[in-house]
Structures are given as structure tokens and as C-alpha cells.
């Protein structure tokens, strides 16, 4: 879990594993449903605050890198398919 998630969990009085802090086993049962949902929402908001939106040039760069990688992978599969096809035709021909 991230730092913010464990921080939010400790601020709630709930350990990262979801059990309440305390020495007794009776105290270590799950928090109620609404407390768990509230904790989840707080953790989601904390994670969303960490998101960095790329600038336009970065986004264009990422798109170009993905397209080039996909084209290289397609070429590799095309060559592999062609060679396997030729091998099967030569073997069973």
C-alpha cells in the first residue's frame, strides 16, 4: 500500500491489514461497512491527488512511442508467422 493509504488507515485507527489496533482479539474484528467504504474513498482521493497529467509534448511523445512499439511487435509477429508457415509447408507440403 502507498504511504497515503497507510497514513489514512492509521489516522482512522485501523491497521493496514484492516483490523482495529489493540491487544485483544475481540477488538480485532473488521470495521463496519461504512467505515471501510469511507476509508476506501479517502485512499482513492489521496491516490488521485498524486496523478500528474502529462503536457501536450509528453503525450505526443508517449503516443509515438506506443505506435512505434506496436508496429515493431506486428512486424516481428508477421515475420515469425511467415517463417512458421514456410516451415510447415516445407515439412508437410
Image (tube, rainbow, N blue to C red):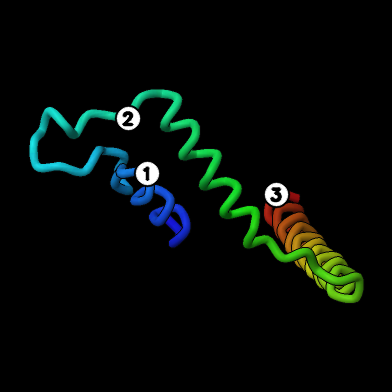
Image point 32% across, 48% down: which residue?
16
Disc with the residue nearer the chain's start (2 vs 3): 2
Residue 81 visible (yes or no): yes
Q: Which SS class for mark 1? A: helix
- Vertical position of residue 46 compared to residue 17: above or below: below
Q: Tell me the mark number nearer the camera, choosing from 1 and 2.
A: 1
Number of the label disc, if any, that sits on residue 76: none
- C-alpha distance separating marks 3 and 1: 68 Å
Q: Which SS class for mark 2? A: loop
Disc with the residue nearer the chain's start (1 vs 2): 1
Residue picked out by circle 2: 31
Residue picked out by circle 3: 92
Image point 68% across, 55% down: which residue?
91
Disc with the residue nearer the chain's start (3 vs 1): 1
Nearest the camera: 69 or 22?
A: 22
Q: Residue 33, how many percent across, how many down?
A: 41, 23
Nearest the camera: 64 or 19?
A: 19
- Vertical position of residue 38 compared to residue 14: above or below: above
Number of the label disc, if any, that sits on residue 12: 1
Label 2 Cα neighbours within 10 Å, binned few <14 / some 14-19 / many ≥20: some
Q: Quadrant of the N terminus?
A: bottom left
Q: Residue 21, how many percent across, how many down?
A: 21, 43
Amino acid at each position: 500500500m502507498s504511504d497515503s493509504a497507510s497514513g489514512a488507515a492509521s489516522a482512522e485507527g485501523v491497521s493496514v491489514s484492516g483490523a482495529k489496533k489493540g491487544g485483544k482479539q475481540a477488538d480485532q474484528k473488521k470495521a463496519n461497512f461504512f467505515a471501510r467504504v469511507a476509508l476506501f474513498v479517502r485512499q482513492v482521493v489521496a491516490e488521485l491527488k498524486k496523478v500528474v497529467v502529462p503536457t501536450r509534448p509528453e503525450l505526443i511523445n508517449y503516443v509515438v512511442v506506443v505506435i512505434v512499439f506496436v508496429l515493431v511487435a506486428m512486424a516481428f509477429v508477421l515475420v515469425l508467422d511467415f517463417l512458421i508457415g514456410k516451415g510447415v509447408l516445407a515439412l508437410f507440403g
